Image (cartoon, rainbow, N blue to C red):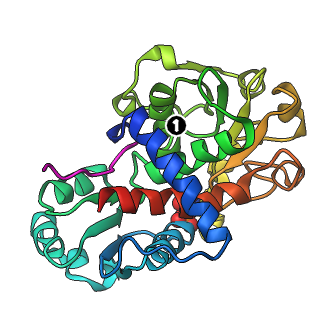
């Protein structure tokens, strides 16, 4: 049987997502009731991190333990992968010692090369181009709060990044429409667009992009820990903050989404992220539940 990898949102069909969300709801319910569930007993997940993480690492590591398996953390700084070992060789070797691998790396090309040489499924834990696990959790969260996302409108306010490109793929798979507004100089790279133009509309003005939408989405603008270097970047984003004024343009029951970490007062006002329309804590928690369903399915 062919190995199934999860490297971008479009790697799964709508039927597969429907099945996985059903499984995630059951798994979440069991977790809330402290009911043990160990379908991955004696199975091992290897997690390779080239970049920092809180949510991705915790959700995969805790999730694998909760499913009865073990998770091993490897960072590229102190493994041979970060010292020049060819990605192809690392894929061959690591995949002979475990049942599934999750990688967070800078380049999509690297994870694709690794997956092509792996004998076990590979999951993308974030690259420069895609963040499929986060957007899977986000769509699951939207459905929990507002029902089906098909036919709905979702706004993306911020720079064109891995989250946006994954949301674009989700718009096609799940049948919703994306309103996109990016500051000048941080706009969509046509080379990263993998869906037809009918799935999204681009707006020059971020407030216009929020009109009539069912969810408003943004992401951190400046890397955590590099605030001083990011002052120039902040200037370009002036006017893009998701605040009460922009939320007022969305539907009255619209939700606010952010994959975190967040800077209050930069990409989002404190009143919005800590307000009644915000679902950010559910989004973070749902990483755990959807990824457990994904691990179960792929292994
Ligand atoms: N949203 C997200 O991927 O968070 P981490 O960088 O903490 O994993």
Q: Residues within 10 Å of mark 1 (few under 14, many from 20)?
A: many
Report which quarter residue 47 is drawn in: bottom left
- At numbered mark 1, what does the secondary structure look like: helix, strand or loop? helix
Report which quarter residue 149 is drawn in: top right
Q: Is residue 96 left or right of residue 168?
A: left
Q: Residue drawn at (24%, 56%), measured in percent from left and top? A: 110
Q: Residue drawn at (46%, 45%), measured in percent from left and top? A: 162
Q: Is residue 76 visible?
A: yes
Q: Is residue 237 left or right of residue 18?
A: right
Residue in the foreground of this view, choosing between 76 and 280: 280
What segment carries the magenta color?
1-9
213 above or below 69? Answer: above
Q: Residue 196 placed where, x, y %?
A: 41, 18
Q: Is residue 6 magenta?
A: yes
Q: Is mark 1 within 8 Å of ligand 1?
A: no
Q: Residue 114 placed where, x, y %?
A: 19, 60
Report which quarter residue 143 is drawn in: top right
């Amino acid at each position: 049987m062919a190995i199934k990898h999860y490297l971008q949102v479009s790697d799964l069909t709508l039927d597969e997502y429907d099945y996985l969300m059903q499984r995630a709801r059951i798994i979440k319910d069991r977790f809330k009731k402290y009911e043990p569930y160990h379908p991955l007993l004696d199975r091992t997940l290897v997690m390779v991190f080239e970049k920092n993480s809180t949510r991705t690492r915790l959700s995969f590591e805790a999730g694998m333990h909760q499913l009865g398996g073990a998770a091993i953390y490897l960072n590229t700084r102190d493994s041979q992968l970060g010292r020049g070992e060819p990605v192809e060789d690392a894929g061959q070797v690591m995949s002979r010692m475990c049942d599934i691998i999750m990688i967070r790396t800078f380049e999509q090309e690297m994870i694709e090369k690794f997956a092509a040489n792996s004998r076990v499924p590979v999951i993308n834990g974030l690259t420069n181009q895609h963040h499929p696990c986060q957007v899977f959790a986000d769509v699951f969260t939207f459905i929990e709060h507002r029902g089906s996302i098909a036919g709905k409108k979702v706004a993306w306010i911020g720079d064109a990044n891995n989250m946006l490109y994954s949301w674009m793929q989700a718009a096609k798979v799940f049948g919703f429409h994306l309103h996109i507004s990016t500051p000048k100089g941080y706009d969509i790279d046509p080379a990263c667009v993998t869906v037809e133009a009918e799935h999204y509309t681009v707006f020059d003005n971020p407030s216009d992009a929020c009109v009539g939408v069912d969810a408003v989405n943004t992401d951190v603008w400046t890397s955590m820990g590099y605030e001083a270097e990011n002052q120039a970047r902040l200037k370009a984003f002036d006017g893009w903050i998701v605040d009460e004024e922009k939320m007022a343009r969305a539907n009255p029951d619209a939700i606010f989404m952010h994959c975190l970490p967040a800077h209050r007062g930069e990409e989002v006002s404190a009143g919005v992220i800590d307000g009644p329309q915000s679902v950010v804590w559910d989004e973070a928690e749902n990483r755990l539940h959807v990824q457990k369903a994904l691990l179960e399915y792929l292994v």
